[in-house]
Image (cartoon, rainbow, N blue to C red):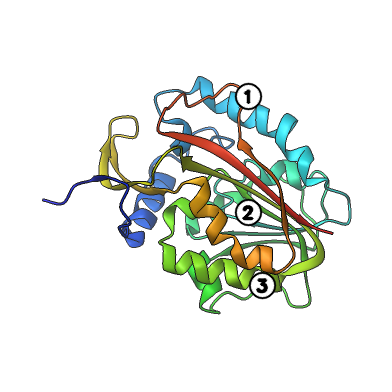
Amino acid sequence: MKDSRVSGEKIAVNVARIHDFYAKRAMEKGGIHVDAPVVLCGDKAPEKITAWTDYEVSERLPLLELTGNSRVLEWGFGTGRITKHILETASHYVGVDYVEDFVTLAKGREDIRRTEHTHFLCGSFEDLAEGRLELPQGVLFDRFVIAGGVMMYINDGVLKKCLAKLPALLAPSAILYISEPIAMEKRLTLNQFYSDELAAEYSAIYRTREEYDGLFAPLYAAEFQMVRSEEFFVEDIKARQETKQWLFLLRRD
């Protein structure tokens, strides 16, 4: 039997099973608080849900410097918990998620402001890398958002392709806001690991800061600079030792 918790080694996770995990949760937990980063907080800690989103909206989203003219590409929008706050300001928005039920949920939310330039699409980061995803033509995005964790579910080879494609979608002046869980000392992979918190098998890759720094090479080559690389929370909501929620903020002026 394969080890389901691998430290310090690079192994691939089954992305199809990760998709199925999220699709199943979207169907089963449609009645949960729509502003909940439930997987990342853990289902058994509902008090952390509000704390996470409140903190992110008040302390972190201002770093995006959104204006009425901002053109935002959000990857992995989930239930639309951050989308709602982005669209309070930005008039151009494209959200992409690879779980169709999440796309349907976000489209049906009456508390999300929409304009004719608001689009919710079903697709994966791999679809982007392979040229299978059709984004609105003629739009260069000046804000790119991952709020919570997306790259942790993508194997290294595909993620490298995705990040190499990303600069072509971005405007000459742009800000990238990437919030991901990372490993504090050495890479940790959960491969069909049974989580008591989630009451399900769960897979994810927790890379180190140094690994992400290497993966961001195409962004640095496109003249983006890292302006913040720091622990996401002042007081860690998840309170874990091996992994922490991290914020990477890159910009090109």
Pick the quarter of the image with the C terminus: bottom right
Quick check: 2 left or right of 34? left
Q: Mark 3, mark 1: which one is toward the viewer?
A: 1
Q: CA distance from mark 2 to mark 1?
A: 33 Å
Query: Which residue is the extreme one toward the right?
Result: 68
- Name above or below for residue 212 compared with residue 247: below
* Label 2 CA crowd tier, 10 Å (few <14, some 14–19, many 20+): some
- Gap between marks 2 and 3 measured at Cα: 17 Å
Residue at the extreme left: 1
236 vs 115, left or right, is left
Amino acid marked by disc 3: Leu
Dot label at residue 216: none
Q: In the figure, 159 relative to 83: above or below?
A: below
The picture places residue 24, in percent across and down from the top left corner, at 36, 49
Q: Residue at x 43, y 54 (%)?
A: 153
Q: Secondary structure at mark 2?
A: helix
Q: Which residue is mark 1?
A: 234
Return the mark for residue 107.
2
Marks 3 and 1 sit apart, C-alpha to C-alpha, by 36 Å
User: Which of the two discs, 3 and 1, labels the residue nearer the N terminus?
Assistant: 3
Disc 1 marks a residue whose amino acid type is Val
For label 3, the residue is 135
Q: Amino acid at mark 2?
A: Lys
